[in-house]
Image (cartoon, grey):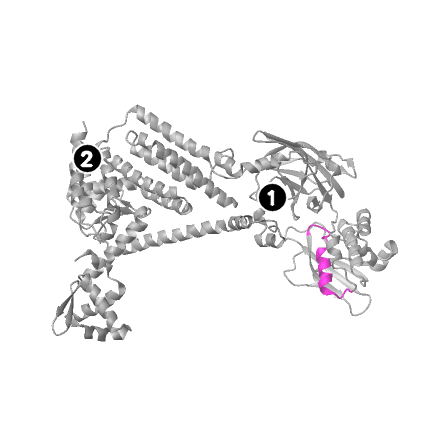
Amino acid sequence: MNETIKLILSLSLSAGILTVLLFSIKPLIRNKFSKSVQYYIWIVVLLRLVLPFSFETSIMNELFYGNQMLQAAASPTINQPMGGTDDNISDTSISLSIKERTASGAYNGDTDHSRYFKDLFNQYILYLWLLGVIISLAVNLTGYALFLKHIRRSNEPAADEENRMLAALLYGRNNVRLMRNHFVSTPMLIGIIRPYIIIPDIKFDEKQLKNILLHEITHLKRFDIAVKWLTMIVSLIHWFNPLVYFIKKEVNHACELACDEAVVKNLSQAEKQAYGDTLISVVAEHKYPIGVLQATMCEEKKSLKERLVSIMNYNKKSKLIIFFSVVLIVCVIFGALFLGAGVGMGKVTPPNIYISAEESKTKSALIGTYEWSYRNKHISSDSDYPMNFEYGKENVVSATGGQQLVIGTQKLKSDRKYDFAIKKIAVYKDGKLTESESIEPSFIDGNLYIQAPQDTGEYIYELVLTYKDKGTVSYGFVVRVDMLTYDLDELSKYKTPYVGDNSKVSAIAGHLPAPDNHFRQQYISMKTDEKPYCLTIYYEPASDSEDRAEWPIVTPDSNIETNSRTNALVVFSMIDNLDEVTFAFRNSQSGGMLDSLKYDTAFTFQRVSFEKKYGELSVLAADLDKLQSILANDGH
Amino acid sequence: MNALVSKITDSEVAVMRVLWDASRELPIADIRKTLEKTSKWETSTIKTLLRRLCEKGVVSAAKKEVFYYTPLVSEAEYNEYATQSLIDRLYSGSAKDLVASLLGSKKLDDSDVRELRNLFKVGDSDE
């Protein structure tokens, strides 16, 4: 199931359980506890429904993600080093589209089609949910907007003395306006940012008006409109949960009771009587007979009756009740936290680490031997030494001598970040341990920074990291310093007999590693009208960073020249009739135009000189292993 | 006026409009003549609409040589009613949940109000 859907469902279920519990204790607390406390409890439920915050150990997380844990724990020993960039255990069934799976015959063995429909359902459930949200959002907002539009059109300003009374009750705060409107049947407060109170356009005496305004101002001061918006958002998100409609009703009712309570708190007996009488007289005001709404009149009466009884019975709560109220609220909050939400687990297996050097792709390490504890479950795995791992392209970092390597557990933002400490760093070259004092590890922002070796060559790094309270993991990866890494399989796809084959030749040029990370390949040009056939490959700085200290490069056997020579070997093996190749470099970016005069450093190589050394070059492309070994031994 | 006014349908309003514009009683022939310009209704359709309006008590029919029809509800009254019922419907739809009102939208009848008044005596229950 989709993670968003899991989250929504878990929030719904979590708050649903809380709601059922609260409804069951409601008879006990209803008349004893303060109405405000009962209101706040429902706000906790609302927050539980929208805030995706949860501990990993919460009930819901266990319910929605717990089985994943078991799957992983069922195979505790993994002898192969685990690599890979994506060993996320969460449902792989989604990632394959159903079409593909149908095509691949994944359902052919099914006697009925339930599995197919289940997958189909899982794939589209997110859209189904979104559709529900959008429809209810549209219905609610258009209804509200139309209501406001028609109300605004028919609003009339209130009389001066009414405004004066409002100002007096607000104690100087005057961001609220008062309006009269003969279409509304009850006084109301509208809006959060620019709130206004609307009263029916009928004659109220001074006492009635004061009581009405007191009620609405209390709503304003308690931010009840914001709670109402929150309630609406909740009911949009959880449109599929029938309990939410009960919660909504309960919140609105509790809101009125709490508001009445706050109003009558400071009133004398006579004033309380007047306040309740005002409620009755507003409801008694028959202005228009409304036939269509008769059905729920009984409910209206019941709710008003409860409010009146609460006003009559209002008394100061004893210390004991206040104490229990606090206990109850704390319990509900803890209950909400304990029930939690399905937010997903941390990895039950050790995290991957990712290594990046500036201007090159981020690579990942292979995981070797590890011990890993996760929520009281202990997994350990033995594997070979990192020295003996088989590293793939994904585990090889190309760097320049002394370049900074950044190592961390986070590749994408969504990856979980772990803090770790180094237990051991060992660097091997040609099977032998090298001096590793020059590594100088440092931590910045949870990432480990180390320096690549100065000398050219291929190094295997063994890194043993300890994760606090979680375990110890050994990793292995390869760093190639100032060495060119060729993807010969890819390159050999473009092997061509003719230098005139523009598309293949540009592809070969593009797939060659740049002789220096500083540069990138941009253009090629060929001379094919007469022999010798020539090819020029142009390089320019990859970014407009600082200029190089030495320019133009004239030193013989500089790293860049050596690497160009190696590239020339590959180019000659891939293009059969090429006689001469030139690698041209410039020290500033070209800005989209090939201006061959600006390339003031160039290295030219002849096919003949290579053939003297290696024999027939064009056959090398057919024997990639041989070419690879020549490149590995001869490159440096 | 009565509650059924709010239940006048759009096509009935079209007929009402003819009567309002004429500001005198009209026979069906005149009504038809006016409506011909804007619609393709048959005489029988107009007859049905007028019959329904009479049933709702918003039009009266007086028999002279033919039936003459008079509106019993003015256009202003009707618009007032339409707006009122629209606002009421919107309010009890979603608007009610987004405003803080003193009371719900439903009116109670006299016996209920009497019952509540009798019940609500602060002094009696307290102290």
> According to the image, label 2 marks what residue?
A272
Q: Earlier in the sequence, mark 2 or mark 1?
A: 2
Residue A506 in the magenta stretch? The answer is yes
Disc ID at residue A208: none
| Contact, mark 2 vs mark 1 (Cβ under 8 Å) | no
Q: Residue at x 29, y 36 (%)?
A: A258
| Badge 2 and badge 1 both on one subunit | yes
User: Percent from the top left, x then y, of residue A10?
Assistant: 47, 40
Residue A510 in the magenta stretch? The answer is yes
Residue A245 visible: yes
Q: Looking at the picture, does residue B10 appear above or below residue B87?
A: below
> According to the image, label 1 marks what residue?
A411
In-front residue for pair A484/A384? A384
Q: Residues within 10 Å of mark 2 (few under 14, many from 20)?
A: many
User: Percent from the top left, x then y, of residue B15?
Assistant: 22, 68
Of badges 2 and 1, nearer the viewer stands 2
Callout 1: chain: A
Q: Which residues are magenta?
A: A498-518
Q: Residue at x 19, y 62 (%)?
A: B55
In-image side of A629 versus A175 (left or right): right
In-image side of A395 versus A39 (left or right): right
SS category of the residue bearing label 1: loop
Callout 2: chain: A
In-front residue for pair A118/A443? A118
Q: CA distance from mark 2 to mark 1?
A: 64 Å
